[in-house]
Amino acid sequence: MRVRFAPSPTGYLHIGGVRTALYNYLFARKNGGEFLLRIEDTDRERSTQESLDQILEAMEWLGLEHDGELTYQSRRLDIYRTLAEQLVAEGKAYYCDCSREELESRKKKLESQGVFVGYDGRCRERGLKKNDSSQMVIRLKVDDGIDLSYTDLIRGEIHFDSKEIEDFIIIRSDGFPTYNFAVVADDHAMGVTHVLRGDDHIINTPKQLALYRALGYDLPQFGHFSMILGSDKSRLSKRHGATSVSEYRESGYLPSALLNYLAKLGWGHGDQELFTKEDLIEAFSLAGVNKAPAVFSPDKLLWVNQEHIKMLPYEEIRPYWEPFLKERGIDPDRRSSEWFAHAVDTLRGRVKTLDEMAEKLRCYFTEIKEWQDKDVQKAMKKSSPEIVHGYAEAIEKIEDFTVSALESHMKAYCEAHELNMGSLAQPLRLAVTGSTVSPGIHDVLALTGKEETLKRIRTFLDYIGS
């Protein structure tokens, strides 16, 4: 069993494309098949190396590894031409030299007569031979009455009337294949057994069925996924927010979260909401794919990302998180993996993106020289400077500057000095982090370290004293 994902390098890899790739990937991995990748780069004007690089980088970042070698349509042009000429030789296709002006004129005439508007077959029986004409194309003969029905794996029986399918072009005047012709030739050559794609391709299916029959190829099985809509129920686009993989990557989303959310966007598996990639492979089936369009929710995706930050081990988060540290001038090698793992654990449930997480850790690597007046007024009472100063003297004597030791010490200190925990923790938090909001104070002190904690307390007391 083989499936394929076939993006065009004419722009970024968008959310809809990722979901199509993901469903193909999951279907292949679940069923012990192969997931192939084909680059449909025959649009010479719009295809760019930049777009290709972005697509390949996105697929790698998402962890959707493909099997076998990449297939590039632009390297198969001679194959398409040979196949088309074979169809001409067999009487299944023909050369056409009708100009655009002629076609438009005849189209208007047919419209005025209220008949089917499509190519009128003028060149079908002319027996034209290949020549140097700049407008010579090759068209497939589509006879009336041929069976163009099929059973869609998601939508069931679908029927098309061949009378409504014109003799369509398979090779353009520039020698390049049309989309439908190249797709059929490639899917057969690659041994694709299941063509799973968006429902915007349903309209292409009858032409592809006609090509399969003309070429004598076995039909693959087809399945079409519903489209993804924006909040206003129109097709998802940039006006609904970020739609590219790179935008979510740069905003601090985990690839596992993006895959989890997109898998659920049009597929169901009971009440379960959170999945790792391995969970998805085990659970996925086409039977769970919905026919109705799905509405994209940025808020739900953000929630899923937060949940993945909570549940994934630090070592799985680290490769995706480190770039956000480096953007802030923080060298991940300045602290041990154990230190960063502890720091991440203190922020699970407090942040929704990796970018936000990196920002929350900035305080441990940045010298604090000033504090906001509103924060000082909020955290500091009249007795607070004396309380903080007294505690600073006490912790100078602590040898074991760990979370558990600090927790026991602070509790004993507050009891001995008849203080409630908040009257000490709040001003201490502000002094050490520069903010009134942080993870637990014992974690903060342990992560800051004894020497740096004392330095920050002294700087803070000098600041408010001045």
Image (tube, grey):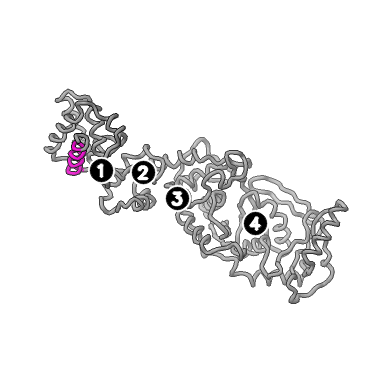
Q: Please give the label number shown on residue 249.
A: 3
What residue would you read off at disc 1?
Answer: 368
Residue pictured at 54% horizontal, 59% vertical? 36
Label 1 crowding class (10 Å Cα cut-off): few <14, some 14-19, many 20+?
some
Q: Please give the label number shown on residue 220.
A: 4
Q: Which residues are magenta?
A: 449-462
Would you place residue 171 above or below residue 303 in this image?
A: below
Inter-mark Cα distance, 1 to 2: 19 Å
Label 4 crowding class (10 Å Cα cut-off): few <14, some 14-19, many 20+?
some
Which badge, 1 or 3, is on the more N-terminal residue?
3
Q: Residue 354 location in percent, x, y? A: 39, 46
Query: Residue extending furthest right?
Result: 113
Q: Please give the label number shown on residue 357.
A: 2
Q: Quadrant of the C terminus?
A: top left
Please tell me whether mark 2 sits on a helix, a strand or a loop.
Answer: helix
Which badge, 1 or 2, is on the more N-terminal residue?
2
Q: Residue 65 location in percent, x, y? A: 48, 57
Closer to the camera: disc 3 or disc 4? 3
Whether residue 33 is in magenta: the answer is no
Q: Name the kind of residue labelled 3 in the image.
A: Arg
